[in-house]
Image (cartoon, helix red, strand yellow):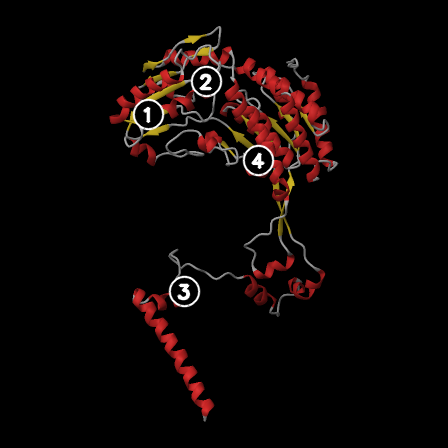
Amino acid sequence: MTIPTFIETTPETVPTAAARVRETFRAHKTRPVEWRIKQLRKLYWAIDKHEADLRLALERDIGKGQFDAMLGEINWVKNDIVYVTTHLKSWMKDEKPTDIDFANRLVSPRIRKDPYGAVLVIGPFNFPLQLCLCPCIGAIAGGNTIVLKPSESTPNCSAMIQLLFTEALDPDAFTVIQGAIPQTQALLAEKWDKIFFTGSVSTAKIVAKAAAAHLTPTVFELGGKNPAIVTANINVPNTARRLLWAKNMNAGQLCMSPNHVLVERKILPQLITELKSAYAEFYPSGAKGTEDWCKIVNLKSFSRLQKLLDATTGTILLGGETDAEQLYVAPTVVLVKDMHDALLAEETFGPFLTLLPAEADAVLAQTRSGGATINDTLFHAIIPTLDFGGVGDSGMGAYRGRASFDAFVHRRSIAKTPNWAERIMKMRYPPYAGTSKYKTFDAMQRRNVNFDREGNDKVAWWVLVLTLGGRKGVLRWIGLVLATVGLKRGGEGGESKV
């Protein structure tokens, strides 16, 4: 198994790389659907070919075992490629709007899915393959060219991504820039047609400021505190296992893991007992040194987590052990007194499951989020074909499945007026004074008002008539109509005999 050496890109070469992908897009090379599908299929087989090296890179960078590496990274990306390439032709077809009034149907309106152009994708360290490559899959499907900047914190995975690009994809359309702040600054100085960023809120603000200078649209996938709410009417053993599993995935380095748990007070003792039982079930010999436990990505992140753990005034119920040399932070459950605790001040992005007694009804009434899972955790975020995106500080925009394609295309409205329609459309030309042109156009376009001056729905007169008296009233009206029809037919029959 051979992993390429991670080599930083010289910042001075960034403008050349950006210009190359822009020029390729302007040459319309990425437009044909067949070209897009072929690029994605070649990427699939490159991933398949280097599966063992990719697993090794994930193990070296972040300590991922085979289970997490395959399901959450390698197979996730491969399955995404199969799904997208299977449906891409149907997604690309022009849409016929369904809400066009009669007068405007004449010009055959439709919506075409046009690529944005040259896009910049900036990926994170926590899922270094999935969160770099899946946005790229959507961008390729949409017909864009790409410059990808993977995380410098996972150098082995970033080097493998560059190898995949080099072996599988068109080098004039898709390229990788390696590095940290200098390279990112050079990239953000360029004008892009769209930017897709996954990472922290603080960095997103820097990206947003750079994008605003060029009015560049963005998709931001950021973090969040992700509170879990536990009420008294739950299955406590199931809840404990599901919470501990979600919190400890990737050693808590997951933007969707529950940052803290708001627990209804009367259920708290039982939940603590079941969390301890689940811990013993998951890690019978402890988590340290097992394939089932990831390491913290680097010393900087480890030090931040250590400071949070040292600063909490809560009671550590489980775990709490750390090892800087091995970048190990144990699965840790902490009971805190209030929202002012250090572990609740920010998204921890680590394996700390913080419990806080609360009144569940009050919390539910005040909750807003980009998504939610009921009776479990994470599932709204780990279904690969379900739209995924945050609100507020958690991000903007969405992707995954069809949404990945939609994120990288502009819905371009198109209308085509036939020449024969000039006989009708010539009414639009002046002069207008002294003609009936306005009345004709107004009659064709005016919509009937279905609400009154107080903003209430209007009810059609015939609905009022039919519903007078409720069900019996309706039956009386039906009987009256049938009787009238019968009398009319009877009269007509009598006349025919005379």
Give the mark, 2 or 3, whose residue is nearer the N terminus.
2
Q: Amino acid at mark 1?
A: Pro
Packing grade of label 4 (10 A; few <14, some 14-19, many >=20) is many
Relative horizontal placement of residue 51, taking residue 342 as reference (left or right): right
**Residue drawn at (59%, 29%), measured in percent from left and top?**
78
Residue under pointer 2: 251
Kindly identify which numbered label has been placed on residue 404: 4
User: Could you say which quadrant of the image residue 431 lies in?
Assistant: bottom right
Q: Secondary structure at mark 3?
A: loop
- Count up the numbered dots: 4
Q: Secondary structure at mark 4?
A: helix
Q: Which residue is mark 1?
A: 237
Q: Nearer the viewer, residue 330 or 415?
A: 330
Point 41% across, 33% down: residue: 373
Nearer mark to the viewer, of 1 and 4: 1
Left or right of 76? Residue 340 is left
| Residue 102: % across, % down | 57, 61
Question: 13 or 122: which is nearer to us?
Answer: 122
134 to 275, vertically: above or below: below
Real-space Cα separation, disc 2 to disc 4, in angstroms: 27 Å
Q: Which residue is mark 3?
A: 460
Residue 310 pos. (x, y %): 38, 11
